[in-house]
Image (cartoon, grey):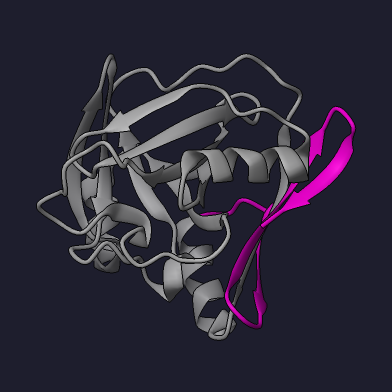
Amino acid sequence: MTAFDHFAISAATLEEGVNHVHRHLGHEMGPGGEHALMSTHNRLSGLGPGEYLEVIAIDPCAPEPDRPRWFDLDRRSGPPGIGNWILRTDDLDAAIARHPEAGRPVAFTRGAYRWRMAVPDDGILPFDGCFPALIQWQSDRPAFADAGLRLRGLSLRHPRADRLATVVAALTEDPRITVEDGPRRIAAAVQTPSGLRRIA
């Protein structure tokens, strides 16, 4: 069983990513923290019960990790954008057995939070990141103040849309997640206090 967990906006710096969210959604991102294993850091905001959005970037104050960073951050360039989306599962090992292309299970801790995530050895998820990262929470999940944001749709665009659609359908039945043909792009439709906004 899987469910939408969050989407991740990757950026050269957290400041750039936070400004990107503010420009498109009119929202100021909440706090976050560091991922020591990956030498990255983030900021988070809720999308209603059980869902959130993340801005993530390489932490310039952290040492180089001993493995490729997740979410293809070692190769990213250009302006901020949605680089990945994440599904949570109750059984990560079983999900990886069905979809080995998701990567290997890696354990993470930050403060009171504990989780396992499937991470490819090269840090690059299939379909140029349109394949979802898989996460299993082993502690309470982050809790957020309700800022009135709700995910209404997540559009995955990729040149191999037919194949991607088959894979996504095997992973989730969430009707908000759609697949279309074209140059690679992930875009979200988010309801905000000032109306429906879009961010990519």
**Chief secondary structure of the magenta span?**
strand
Going 81% across and 33% down the picture, which residue do you hit? 192
Going 18% across and 63% down the picture, which residue do you hit? 121
Above/below status of 181 relative to 59: below
Q: Is residue 134 left or right of residue 184?
A: left
Residue most toward the left? 66
Give how far across and how far down residue 116 sits, in percent: 24, 38
Q: Is 92 part of what is drawn in magenta?
A: no
Quadrant occupied by the C terminus: bottom right
Residue 17: image quadrant is top right
Give the magenta range.
Answer: 172-200
Tally of marks: 0
Give how far across and how far down residue 55 sits, in percent: 51, 41
User: Can residue 162 be seen from the camera position used here?
Assistant: yes
Q: Is residue 12 left or right of residue 159?
A: left
Q: Is 181 part of what is drawn in magenta?
A: yes
Residue most toward the front? 61
Q: Is residue 189 left or right of residue 70?
A: right
Going 64% across and 31% down the picture, which residue do you hit? 47
